[in-house]
Amino acid sequence: MKKIKLKEVRSIEEDEDLISKLPDVLLSSIISLLPVVEGVRTSVLSRRWEKVWKYSSHLNFDQRKMLMPLMKEYIDTSEPATRLQMALYPKISVDDEKYLDTIAQAAMLITSIIDNHIGPLKSCSIRHIVESCANGDATGWMRKLLAKEVTEVSMELEPFDYCHLISERVFMEVGWTLNLPFEVFSNFKILKLKNYKFKITDFSNPSQILQTLTLSNLDIKSKTFQEIISHCSSLENLIIENCDSLVNVKVDSSSLKYFKICDMLVQNFLISSISVEIIEIDSINCNIGEIIFETPKLRVLHAYRDLKNPRNFVSLYGNKLLGTRNINSRFSAS
Amino acid sequence: MAEEVSSQMNSLSISETNPSSSATISLVSGDDIVFKVEPTIAKEMETVQSFIDETDGKITTIPLPNISSHDLPYVIEYCEKSIAGKITKEFEAEFVKKLNNEEVKELFLAANYLNIKKLLDFLSQVIADRIANKSVEYVRRYFGIENDFTPEEEAKLREELAWTFTGVDPDDEDEN
């Protein structure tokens, strides 16, 4: 066989193709695919592996699945209201782990894993329990992820299924209210938020890299929403799912290219975006008012509905189902 | 998002414009077996393609000393499916069923060497699935890792990380 020198081509010098000869970065990429807890466990494999997880590109947390079976036992045997109360006044002896409840312990682990990760961390998803939203841990994680310059972030509050058991309204409110710094909407490239009510205090921020924003089942005021969108100058993809509080909305963005709205009741929805090329409408109910597109560059419009869900049907005018003819006439008119 | 939708729309036109202009490429495995493939297949293998590009397409026989004739057909099969746009969940499930742990690792190394991103990502997932919820001993055996901790060090580490050990499959401790 003729020997040809492969220039600038990576080659594995050793003949034994043991996986342990692979660069750490490839091992880290495998670890990135495991749930965080399992990733961290690989530290015990050998000295070399002690650090591998700290370079994984992705961290994937599910708070309720941490510290099993203690977590299940704790949640099954305690009152939701008591837990929330503890979450709100936990600061008595935070130094001593013994005094922390299981949820707080899991939250502390999440914090320490983020702190100990060396990076670079490309993406992080956190699904957490109500209590960690109430006591501000969730906001704290967001701030840490901002400081670590993570590109893609997904934060989800697990369904607050026992809110009816909590008599005091104030507890219910804090359980799902996320206090966000506005940097969240400017310094991540891809952001998904699910199942929150959120508050934003300060809108000023010069650097803008947010490209894709997904808002899912959020209680958000139309005014706040519009303000966010108007500040996101590099936003290209916007997905809104099941945010029924957004009844009268104007989406005004010159950078937006893709817009999807699904599973929602809307009244007046105006999408005024010169760059939008693709719009998807999925199972939207618009009985009163109308959806208007001021989108001169629109190339593709997907409109469909989920027949299995009787609540939802696509309609642009009154109760009429959306048909191709409606869309065409709408566009030629605008 | 937007890219996904546009790529769906463009997929038709892309598959039509693919004239096979140049000659076939010969890939030579580490044990000197020659595999003739279409140039489009070589394109999927970044390492091979960059070599072809560097020699302006004059050299069409590429030695791959790190890949055996046992593994190369799998790689080629995956690339063929990939350019045909037929990488489905079903195909991947069937593909991986044929492979034992050793073969998965070999293919992973081959995909890394040839720089085939899709195959590398897919096999990373396969390996992650195969070590998920497994005991430390199992994962050591799987990767061929030598435990270089002293028993005291390991015990201390296990204690510190006790919270990560709660969901492990107990039955796998002695599995080989």
Image (tube, coloured by chain):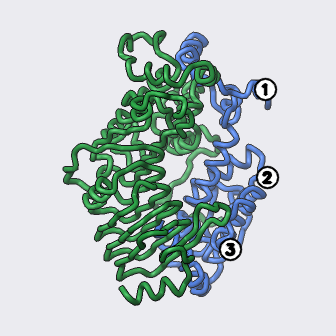
Task: Report the label total.
Answer: 3
Residue at 36 percent of width and 36 percent of height? A139
* Mark-to-mark CA distance, 1 and 3: 44 Å
Name the residue that disc number 3 marks: B37
Instruction: Give amino acid for label 3.
Output: Val
* Marks 2 and 3, the one that precedes in the sequence: 3
The numbered disc on residue B97 is 2
**What secondary structure is found at the residue carrying circle 1?**
helix
Check if mark 2's residue and mark 1's residue have beta carbons within 8 Å. no
Name the residue that disc number 1 marks: B171
Chain identifier matching the blue colour in the rendered picture: B
Q: How many residues crowd around disc 3 within 10 Å: few (fewer than 14), some, or many (20 or more)?
A: some
State which chain disc 1 sits on. B
* Marks 1 and 3, the one that precedes in the sequence: 3
Name the quarter where the N terminus of chain A is drawn: bottom right
Residue at 50 percent of width and 35 percent of height? A128
Residue B70 seen in the current view: no
Q: Which image quadrant for residue A268?
A: bottom left
